[in-house]
Amino acid sequence: MKTNNTPKSMRLHIGIFGKRNAGKSSLTNAITHQETSIVSEQAGTTTDAVEKTMEMLPLGAVVLIDTAGIDDTGALGKERVKKSKKITERTDIAIIVSDYDGWNEYDFELAKTFNENNIPIVAVINKTDIKQPEKEKIKKITEKANFVVTTSVKTDKSLVEKIREALIRCVPEDYINPPAILENIAEKDDTVILVTPIDKEAPKGRLILPQVNVLRELLDNNCVAVVVTEKQLENALKALKNKPKCVITDSQAFKTVAEIVPEDIAMTSFSILFARLKGDLKTFYEGAKQIDKLSDGDRVLICESCTHHPIEDDIGRVKIPNLLKKKTGKKLVIDNVSSHEFPENIGDYKLIVHCGGCMTNRREILSRMNKAREKGVPITNYGIAISYCLGICERAMKPFLNGK
């Protein structure tokens, strides 16, 4: 996969924050070498977050997110601030932009949030062509930020290099050395069968993203990848001279696949692989065990990281709710959210079921898991929840629980 086609969910997310008219949009345009954001002397020009994907060597694929001023006012302004703060949940590195007067209370409040969540901060003190910042103000910022850049977006010809250097110094270790999707699952020369049902949710002419990512990693690792639908799985197993190391299936075909694949062959799902890659697998696993504790009237929140029009037999809106109700025998209240939506009243729920997260980054998934933990709400994952409801969770989790 070429880096310029890297999905957003696999890119480094760089959020650009700060008060109105600090130069956030000008900085975004300077970094991208494009008129990505509207620039104006009038404060509050950026009303909604503006995202731009690009290649920033040597970091590779990144997403720049230009946000509205954190000090915006009025009814609409408060909504913009709320949206800007929401961006913090999927930010891998934060850039806080201020002018020569340094940070104000809003900037320090932002920094506190980032510090508490171990998100690196690059402080950009802009407009030094007008006035140089006081040393004492720089010192206060340095105490909270990982790196400080003093510059003028208008006149500093070395601006982009300064920002690039600061980002390199701050980039999280797990981005430099990202975990493998198939770690401890498949090694060189192993044969792995991928079961990819062609149903209404499969994009015409394409595979869904988790299937593509897993297939590519298998090829990169010089493994033998056999791709079949569930209807051809039995024939594929018979045709192989040696048994496969593992069978990885779409969660929706779990029941059929479990009945076909012999017990001595490891079996799991794409969704469970992504549960480990994007979140905390143990927490998701323990969350699934709470399904049996649900009672009549309990509310369950189902979260999807992508946005699509609901279809007949939709996995998040139909299949999983039906499985939960059948497994528990209870009258449950099911709510659905999608994309970057995540309700503030999660304490009202008895269980959260999250998708694999292929369309969002790990930072956002971990942020949601942390919020659930703080409210004492168990959270699980699509694949783990489905396997639990079907009575095959232990088998689907075995490759991970045994560390093999």
Image (cartoon, rainbow, N blue to C red):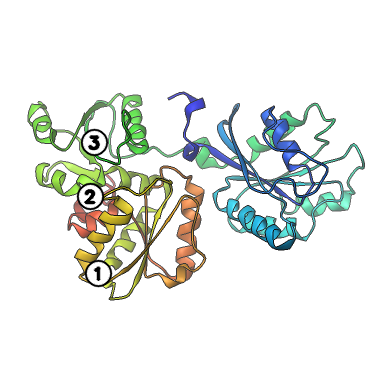
Residue type (three-letter) at the residue carrying disc 2:
Ala
* Residue 22 in view in this figure: yes
Give the Cα distance between marks 3 and 1: 31 Å
Can residue 118 be seen here? The reply is: no
Q: Which sits earlier in the primary sequence, circle 2 or circle 3?
A: 3
Q: Position of residue 186 (x, y in %)?
A: 28, 35
Q: Mark 3 is on which residue type?
A: Ile
Q: Residue at x 26, y 44 (%)?
A: 269
Distance of label 2 from label 3 (alpha carbons)? 21 Å
Q: Whole-percent x and y of residue 153?
A: 80, 35
Q: Position of residue 67 (x, y in %)?
A: 66, 47
- Closer to us: mark 2 or mark 1? 1
Residue drawn at (26%, 72%) of the image: 331
Q: Amino acid at mark 1?
A: Asp
- Above or below, comparing residue 50 to residue 82 in the picture: above
397 relative to 24, above or below: below
* Residue that numbered label 2 is attached to: 396
Residue occupying image coordinates x 9% and y 35%:
234
Quick one: 296 or 310, which is closer to the camera?
A: 310
State the residue position of label 1: 292
> Which quadrant is the N terminus positioned in?
top left
Circle 2 crowding by C-alpha within 10 Å: few under 14, some 14–19, many from 20 = many
Task: List the residue tagged with mark 3.
Answer: 198
Ranked by sequence position, the earlier of labels 2 and 1 is 1
